[in-house]
Image: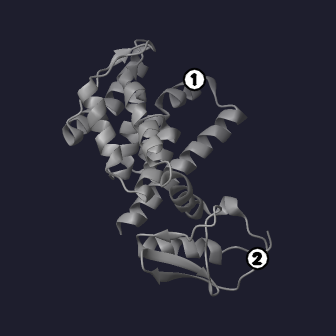
């Protein structure tokens, strides 16, 4: 798409903060006006549009995409998104440990157990740990507590949490990221611990490199989006 505006700027809105492209309000792909609760987030979205060249590259505007997802997908499907995101607690990555080799088991315990301890204290939601990949039934009260924690997020923060959860395969890691317990680099490290361990021994192929870069980008976007919402 060719650039059709000269200026992009954040604007005041009755429901928060919007973005104007010249005099026209920025809208989502579903044609809803893009309005966010935080002025810093609106300014960052406006900056994405300001930095476009003669052709608009939507791939270079992750904050715009995530805000649009919140408005177009999360708001009308809120209950489904809450359930989808909360369900990760039932099979959370950090609960499934290796028995062998001992070095991997040690790294998993050192990286993941503090996150489980934090989540237990923060949400009163202990999760059980097992070795192997056989499904493990988690305490219903803990799953209910995690669902309540997810449901407490507004649509914008829920969109960031959903992105981080899907990227990492872990609701615990995603909550730690959006609550600033972890930054994006550390979230990537703990989410990709097993993969990184294997790469140390066997090397990394081009598909792994591409997948891991995408995961790192998603976690960084979720972190920045959540931080801007809280400013």
User: Is 98 placed left or right of 76 in the picture?
Assistant: left
Where residue 82 sits, quadrant-wise, is: top left
Judging from the image, the colouring scheme is: one colour
Label 2 vs label 1, nearer the camera: 2
First reached walking from the N terminus: tag 2 or tag 1: 2
According to the image, label 1 marks what residue? 201
Q: Where 1 sits versus 167, above or below?
A: below
Decide which of 11, 57 is in the foreground and name it: 11
Residue at the (22%, 42%) spot, across then down: 122
- Judge left or right: residue 18 versus residue 176: right
Question: What residue is rendered at 43% in x and 56% in y?
Answer: 155
Tell me if 199 is positioned left or right of 191 in this view.
right
Sort mark 2 into few (<14), some (14-19) or many (20+) by Cα contacts within 10 Å: few
Residue 182 visible to the viewer: no
Q: Which mark is residue 8?
A: none
Q: In which quarter of the image is residue 205?
A: top right
Question: In percent of the image, x 35 and y 65: which residue is there?
Answer: 230
User: Which structural element holds mark 1?
Assistant: helix
What residue sits right under mark 2 in the picture?
A: 3
Question: Alpha-carbon neighbours of circle 1 within 10 Å: few (<14), some, or many (≥20)?
Answer: few
Q: Which residue is drawn at 48% across and 38% down?
A: 168
* Quadrant in the picture for the C terminus: bottom left
Residue 203 pos. (x, y %): 64, 28
Classify mark 2: helix, strand or loop: loop
Q: Where is residue 214 in the image (x, y as percent from the top left)?
A: 61, 45
Residue 178 x/y as whole percent: 38, 51
Q: Do the residues labelled 2 and 1 touch (CB within 8 Å)?
A: no
């Amino acid at each position: 798409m060719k650039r059709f505006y000269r200026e992009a700027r954040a604007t005041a809105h009755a429901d928060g903060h919007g973005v104007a492209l010249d005099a026209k309000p920025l809208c989502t792909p579903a044609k809803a006006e893009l309005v966010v609760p935080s002025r810093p987030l609106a300014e960052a979205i406006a900056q994405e549009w300001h930095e476009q060249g003669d052709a608009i590259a939507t791939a270079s505007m992750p904050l715009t995409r995530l805000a649009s997802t919140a408005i177009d997908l999360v708001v009308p499907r809120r209950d489904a998104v809450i359930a989808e995101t909360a369900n990760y607690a039932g099979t959370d990555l950090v609960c499934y440990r290796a028995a062998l080799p001992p070095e991997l088991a040690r790294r998993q315990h050192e990286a993941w157990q503090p996150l489980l301890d934090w989540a237990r204290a923060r949400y009163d939601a202990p999760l059980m740990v097992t070795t192997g990949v056989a499904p493990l039934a988690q305490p219903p009260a803990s799953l209910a507590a995690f669902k309540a924690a997810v449901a407490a997020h507004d649509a914008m923060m829920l969109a960031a949490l959903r992105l981080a959860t899907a990227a990492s395969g872990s609701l615990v890691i995603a909550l730690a990221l959006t609550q600033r317990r972890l930054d994006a680099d550390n979230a990537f490290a703990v989410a990709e611990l097993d993969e990184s361990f294997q790469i140390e021994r066997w090397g990394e192929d081009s598909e792994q490199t591409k997948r891991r870069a995408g995961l790192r980008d998603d976690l960084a976007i979720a972190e920045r989006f959540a931080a801007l919402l809280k400013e």
